[in-house]
C-alpha cells in the first residue's frame, strides 16, 4: 500500500487533498499528532517514512521540508509557490504536453501549478506552442476568484459577522504587478515579458474564471474564433480533466453570463472562446481549490503511481 504524508494538512489545500483520498483503499495516510504538527523531528520522521509527501505549506516552510528528506525514495509533490520555476523540479500540469506528463510520471519532485497560473497557462501555452502568437506578444490577464484562495485568515474575515463593508464587493489586489504567480506564468509559457495581471477576489467561497483578451490583428495571422477553438480542441484532445467548448460556449454561456463559481468542488477545467472576429476573449474556468490546487496535486500523484489519473477526482 502506498504511504502518503500531507505536511500542512490543516491548511485549506491540505484538507482538500485529504478529502479527495476518502474511500481510497490503495493509500495509507500517515497522520501526525496535533500537538506535533510543527515538530520538525516528527515531520522529518513521517516525510521519510512516506512514499509520497504533499507539501501544503508557506514557501519557506516548504523549502525547509524538502531539506528534511533523507530517504532517496521519497517523492515530493509541492503545492506551494516555492519550486514552480525551479529547473530541478517538474511542473505539475500534465495536459500541457506529452513531455510534461512523462516528466511527472517519472519525477521525484513535482511543483503543482498555482490556481491563477493554471487558468492563464491553459490558454497561453497552446497559443505559443502552436505558433498563434509570439513570445513577445503583449498580454493582459484578469481573473475573478472566490475568497478561499486567500488563506485561512482571509476566509475567517469573509465569513465573520463583522465583515468589513468593502468585503461585500469584488476587490482588485496585487496592484504593484508583483503577484506571486507571475514568474511561473511567464516561464512555463516561454514569454519574453510578464503579462499585465489583474486578480480580483470576490465574496463567494470557491471557483474562478481567468480571462485573456486577444486582438486578432496582433496575432501571427488574423485567426478566427473557430480556428482558435479548433486549436484548443486538438491540443487538449483526450484529456479527461479539460473541456474545450465551441465558440460562444454552446449553451453554457447562452444567457450572456459566464459565472465563476460553477466548478466549485470539481477537479476539471473548462475553456471558452467568445467575442467576435475583431476582439476575441479566452477564458478558463476552474475551482481554485480543485484543478487549481488539491485536485491538480492528486492528479499528479495518480500519474506518478501509474494509475488512472482521474482516480478519486471524477
Image (cartoon, helix red, strand yellow):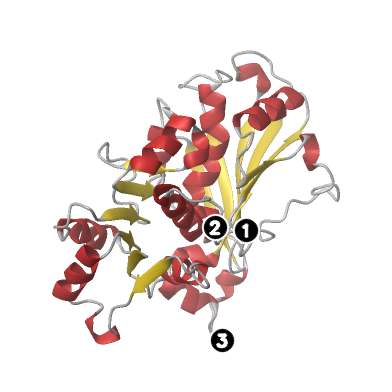
Whether residue 278 appears in this view of the structure is: no
In this view, which residue lies farthest toward the front? 1
Q: Which mark is residue 311?
A: 2
Residue 60: quarter of image: bottom left
Name which of mark 3 and mark 1 comes first in the sequence: 3
Say above or below: 164 vs 27.
below
Tag in front: 2 or 1? 2
Name which of mark 2 and mark 3 comes first in the sequence: 3
Element assignment for label 1? loop
Residue under the image location 67 percent in, 21 percent down = 216
Task: Residue 27: give x, y in percent of width and height.
Answer: 41, 67
* Residue topped by disc 1: 314
Say above or below: 52 vs 33.
above
Element assignment for label 2? loop
Front residue of 141/3: it is 3
Task: Residue 153: give x, y in percent of width and height.
Answer: 41, 74
Task: Residue 299: give x, y in percent of width and height.
Answer: 49, 52
Q: Which mark is residue 161?
A: 3
**268 with respect to 49 (left or right):** right
Amino acid at each position: 500500500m502506498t504511504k502518503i504524508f500531507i505536511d500542512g494538512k490543516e491548511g485549506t489545500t491540505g484538507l482538500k487533498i485529504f478529502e479527495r483520498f476518502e474511500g481510497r483503499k490503495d493509500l495509507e495516510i500517515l497522520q501526525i499528532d496535533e500537538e506535533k504538527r510543527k515538530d520538525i523531528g516528527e515531520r522529518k520522521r513521517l516525510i521519510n517514512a512516506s512514499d509520497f509527501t504533499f507539501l501544503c505549506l508557506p514557501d519557506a516552510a516548504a523549502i525547509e521540508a524538502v531539506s528534511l528528506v533523507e530517504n532517496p525514495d521519497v517523492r515530493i509533490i509541492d503545492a506551494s509557490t516555492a519550486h514552480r520555476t525551479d529547473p530541478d523540479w517538474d511542473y505539475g500540469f500534465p495536459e500541457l504536453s506529452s513531455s510534461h506528463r512523462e516528466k511527472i510520471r517519472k519525477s521525484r519532485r513535482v511543483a503543482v501549478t498555482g490556481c491563477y497560473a493554471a487558468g492563464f497557462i491553459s490558454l497561453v501555452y497552446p497559443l505559443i506552442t502552436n505558433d498563434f502568437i509570439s513570445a513577445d506578444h503583449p498580454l493582459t490577464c484578469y481573473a475573478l476568484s472566490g475568497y478561499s484562495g486567500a488563506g485561512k485568515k482571509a476566509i475567517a474575515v469573509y465569513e465573520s459577522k463583522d465583515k468589513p463593508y468593502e468585503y461585500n464587493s469584488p476587490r482588485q489586489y496585487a496592484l504593484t504587478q508583483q503577484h506571486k504567480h507571475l514568474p511561473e506564468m511567464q516561464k512555463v509559457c516561454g514569454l519574453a515579458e510578464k503579462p499585465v495581471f489583474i486578480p480580483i477576489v470576490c465574496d463567494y467561497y470557491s471557483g474562478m474564471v481567468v480571462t485573456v483578451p486577444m486582438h486578432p490583428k496582433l496575432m501571427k495571422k488574423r485567426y478566427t474564433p473557430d480556428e482558435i477553438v479548433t486549436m484548443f480542441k486538438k491540443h487538449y484532445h483526450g484529456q479527461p480533466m479539460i473541456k474545450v467548448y465551441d465558440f460562444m460556449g454552446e449553451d453554457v454561456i447562452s444567457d450572456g453570463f459566464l459565472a465563476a463559481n460553477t466548478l466549485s468542488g470539481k477537479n476539471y477545467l473548462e475553456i471558452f472562446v467568445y467575442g467576435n472576429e475583431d476582439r476575441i476573449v479566452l477564458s478558463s474556468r476552474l475551482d481554485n481549490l480543485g484543478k487549481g490546487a488539491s485536485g491538480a496535486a492528486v492528479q499528479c500523484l495518480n500519474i506518478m503511481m501509474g494509475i488512472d489519473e482521474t482516480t478519486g477526482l471524477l
